[in-house]
Image (tube, rainbow, N blue to C red):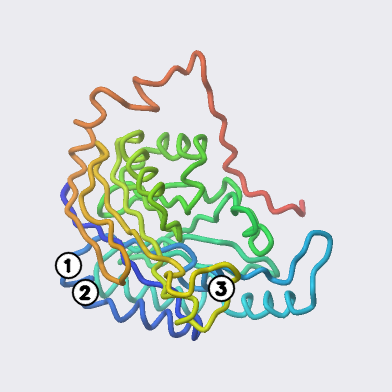
Amino acid sequence: MPKSIVAALQIGSLPEGKGATLEQILSYEGAIIDAGAQLVVMPEALLGGYPKGEGFGTQLGYRLPEGREAFARYFANAIDVPGAETEALAGLSARTGANLVVGVIERSASTLYCTALYFDPQSGLQGKHRKLMPTGTERLIWGQGDGSTLSVQDTQVGRVGAVICWENMMPLLRTAMYAQGIEVWCAPTVDEREMWQASMRHIAHEGRCFVVSACQVQASPRDLGLEIAHWPAERPLIAGGSVIIGPMGEVLAGPLVGHAGLLSAEIDTDDLVRARYDYDVVGHYARPDVFELSVDLQPRPGVRFT
């Protein structure tokens, strides 16, 4: 069926840790069923947390012992893939009948990755995408993904792919996703700025695809028991802004700002053919005689035993 209901679940990581955050996610089971959602996108780093404002004791040229302790706590709050948390999320997918895209902090050996996980109601954990380029000081705590997880998944709502936060502003990455026939573009994020809304509308219009952006929402640092230098005491740490966009750049639902909630909209993938009539960025509007993109989809582990 080309028509379906897609949703963005706007919630935030809880300071009590991944167990409490997982329970918060599971508490939306009834809301997902009531909305009839067949795809639910959740924010970046939801399980594991986005440590906004944390410096991890790092100055240029040296690291402080308390920063190592902060990283050890953050590492302990990350999840294994697969693991107990992925089993619980697979159960949620099965009970609601919804495909899920969930932002997590993935623990692999001694490295952390900012990852989006895909869940299918029938098969459970379907795949994952690791963020290719952590932004700014995110590189202190997260490793870089490789092209082996840069893919789209076949789901009940169409071909779905996840692009995490500022990866959305990498033009060549976008082109690689368009070329894989993406129909529903999922954007887990913690970017609350007005410019993010413009980026989401641009991607929908450029790729002639549906966009579901799910952003965390967090209270003020004071309410969370945090102290962040130069941060206004009453300002939310992350204000949300989840939004659903149609393939001509039109806003279908949202943005949802300032509070938690499940944002949903009906989409019709038959609309994509009409939208691409005059603009198919990797089809009739491409110029392969002038421009060509090569994408390496091989795993790059750094050490290979043969």
Tag 1 near tag 3, CB within 8 Å: no
* Front residue (pair 99, 74): 74
User: Residue 278, how many percent across, how many down?
Assistant: 25, 22
| Mark 3 element type | strand
Mark 2 or mark 3: whose residue is earlier in sequence: 2
Instruction: Reply above or below: 63 against 180.
Output: below
Q: Which residue is mark 3?
A: 80
Tell me if label 2 and label 3 are in contact, CB under 8 Å. no
State the residue at coordinates (53%, 23%): 292
Query: Which label belongs to residue 151?
Result: none
* Residue name at image x 49 percent, y 42 percent: 169
Q: Of discs 2 and 3, which sits in the foreground?
A: 2
> For the point 36% across and 71% down, which residue is it?
11
Pointer 3: residues within 10 angstroms few (<14), some, or many (20+)? Answer: some
Q: Residue at x 17, y 53 (%)?
A: 266
Spot the residue most to the top.
Answer: 289
Image height of 306 relative to 294, above or below = below
Question: How far apart in space, not on screen, are marks 2 and 1 (Cα)?
Answer: 6 Å
Tell whether label 1 touches label 2 (CB within 8 Å): yes
- Numbered tag placed on residue 31 in the rendering: 2
The residue nearer to you, when weighing 242 against 115, is 242
Residue denoted by label 1:
35
How packed mark 1 is, by other alpha carbons closer than 10 Å (few <14, some 14-19, many 20 or more), is some
Q: Nearer the viewer, residue 190 or 81?
A: 190
